[in-house]
Every structure is written in C-alpha cells, then in structure tokens.
Image: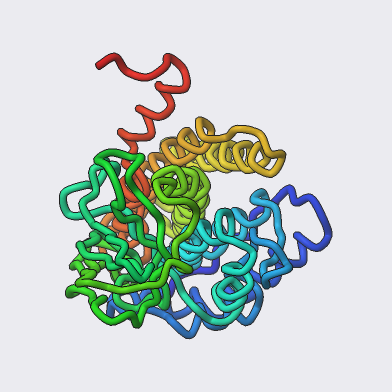
Amino acid sequence: MPDRAPQPVDRQLPTDEARDLISLVRDIAQREIAPSAAEEEDAGRFPREVFTLLSDSGLLGLPYDAEFGGGEQPYEVYLQVLEELAAARLTVGLGVSVHTLASYALAAHGTKEQQAEHLPAMLGGGLLGAYCLSEPASGSDAASLRTKAVRESGGDWVITGTKAWITHGGIADFYTVMARTGEDGPRGITAFLVPGDAEGLSAAVPEKKMGLKGSPTAQIHLDGVRIPDARRLGDEGQGFAIALSALDSGRLGIAACAIGVAQAALDEAVSYAAERRQFGKPIADFQGLRFMLADMATQIEAGRALYLTAARLRDAGRPFAKQAAMAKLHCTDTAMRVTTDAVQVLGGYGYTADFPAERYMREAKVLQIVEGTNQIQRMVIARHLAGPEER
C-alpha cells in the first residue's frame, strides 16, 4: 500500500519567504519523494536524482552564506525543511542533514580562498558530502581516532586509516575527514577536505542495515591519500573542536528528522484509525486508542518545540550545545515511541510491509544511535548541569 502524504503541520515561521520555502519543500516531497519511498527503500536504492533536484532548488545549502551559493536561512527554518523531507523519506532528510554537516568545517573554518574555490559547488553545484569522524575502534570515544595524516617535506599531507559508519560512503563527492596529525587525544586532530575521487580512497561494501536501506553506510579506506595543505581546514590540532562544533548543529538536524518520521507515523496511525472499523464503528472512537494518539501527538509537539528552541538560540549566537543534546535525545526517543505505537494502532497490518508504519519504526531506531548515542547525549547534558565527571 503506498505511503499517505503527511498532513501539513501548522508551522510558526518567521517570514513570508520561509513560508514560501516550506511550500516548495512540501511540493517536492509529495511529488518527487514520497510516492516511491517505500519501493526504493525496499530495493535499497539511493535517490541521487532527488539530491540533484534539491541542489538545483537551492535546498542543499540553506543555512550557509548566500555569497557562496547558500540560502542564508536561519536554523529555525532550515530544520523545519529537514523535518518535511524526513517525513517523506528519511534517506533524503538525513542525507541533507549529513551533507550540511560535511560542509560545516569549510563554511565555518575555511579561508576565504578555500570557501570561494569549493563552497559554490558543495552548496548548489550538485555535489554531495560525507562526514568522517568515527572509526571501527573509536565511535563514542571519537578523540581516540587512529587515522593519521603525515606532512611531507613538500607540504602535502598523506592520510592513512579507516573511517566507519560513513553515510554516503562510496558515493560522496567530498569527505570531511578528521585525522591525527599530532599527539594522542583531541588536541592532535586536524580536519581535511578530501575529494571523493582521490587516489587511494575506496569504500567497503555498504553495511546491511535494518532500516534506511536506501542510504549507503560504509567504511572508507584511505590508503596513502595525498592532498595539498590547501585542503587542510582550520589550524593543525583544531580538528576535534571543529568536529564537536559541527555535531552540535548536526544533532539538531537529527532531532528534526526524528520529528519528521514521528509525524509521518502519527499521520498514518490517525488515518488508519479513522478508516478501520471494528464492533460497528471506527477504532478511532475507542478511548484507549484515542488516548494513545493524543500522547503521540503531544510528544511530537514537545519535541518540535525543543529543537526549535535550540535552533533559535543558535540563530541568536547564544550557546546551544546543551539544548541540542536535549533535542537529539528527546526527539529520537519520541520517534522510537511514536513509531512503535503506530505499529500497534495498525495491529497486524502495522507489522506488514504493505503499510509504512513498520518502516518508520525500523528507521527511528538508528536515530537514537547516530551523531552521538542517546547515552552520550545524557552525558553531555549532565556535564552542563553538574560539571565534568571526576576521574
């Protein structure tokens, strides 16, 4: 059974331009993304043509400067665009979020010359990015990464190592890579912009995942990849700080995607409950189910308010790391609860692939893991409340 179009969310948007932007995104989502989402996810097909369309429509660089082809939109608006895209298909919403994450180091810490050379193609020229921090032996403990970049006498860097769990691994046009250039720990890490066709760069066979099958996740091997110093982003040893700063914003992207998936699941559950009849009336008339739907809707609204609060802090130039961790934690846990409840509302049908509820539930799970597990988010929040843990 095809996915039903999600019901429009009554959004609070700051400008008429933002309202027009959301209308454009909804139109693209309903015409170009949602109709084939279930079939393409089942086939494990990545919709590169959709990302080309999004790039051509100015939707791959929304939070970045117009000077280099960005949309110069506040995060308050950009995140609601992500939510709309994720509600239609998480592979697309998450893909845009990851691309934005991969572009951050250059946009925030690159020189004007680097930005002028690379950003226009990244933000509106059809390129797609990937973010390379995690490794097979360093996930949550990212500061222990082992990939090395060694500077040769001529000034070039030679990068060797393996990155793991890379979204868009093997299909990205550029990779933002964190590599060790100095001492152990966070201060010895530097960021680099590595082209996708660099000699010595290769991708392993994509992981076989329980959900998000259309979004390739793969290890990336860097076997003596040589790049000029002009592709170093920021100062030597600044890479880990850049990575963490990027993740604060990236976690808001994950939170918005989670609410998009949850909203789609709620829409499916409400629609089904209104149509399905038992004991002579729609099951939506039974109080137990009505209360379940009410709880689902309330959790979604709370999550949306939380990620927008964090976004508005970011837009105002105020600290938002704690609120970003809270939003990522709450919104992804909400997505897991809401999608599980949506399957329950549909009963046996919810457990079949004829309806999208089971896909939403499988996809929601990964959002509790990526860009910092929810256990890590609790550590971040607690650190802001009570200070660092004693060693």
Residue pictured at 53% horizontal, 39% vertical:
303
The residue lying furthest to the front in this view is: 153
Q: Is residue 19 left or right of residue 150?
A: right
Percent x, y for residue 54?
58, 76
Q: Is residue 131 left or right of residue 59?
A: left
Residue 39 seen in this snapshot: no
Quadrant in the picture for the C terminus: top left
Q: Is residue 232 left or right of residue 202?
A: right
How is the rendered protein coloured? rainbow
Residue 59 seen in this snapshot: yes
Percent x, y for residue 77?
68, 54
Residue 338: quarter of image:
top left
Residue pictured at 33% horizontal, 80% vertical:
198
The residue lying furthest to the right in this view is: 16
Quadrant in the picture for the N terminus: bottom left
The residue lying furthest to the bottom in this view is: 49
Q: Is residue 282 left or right of residue 372?
A: right
Percent x, y for residue 217?
28, 66
Residue pictured at 27% horizontal, 42% vertical:
183
Taking depth in this image into account, of 101 and 235 the one nearest to the observer is 235
Percent x, y for residue 147?
23, 57
Residue pictured at 49% horizontal, 60% vertical:
97
Q: Is residue 69 above or below residue 266?
A: below
Taking depth in this image into account, of 367 and 167 the one nearest to the observer is 167
Taking depth in this image into account, of 239 and 366 the one nearest to the observer is 239
Tell me how many marks there are.
Answer: 0
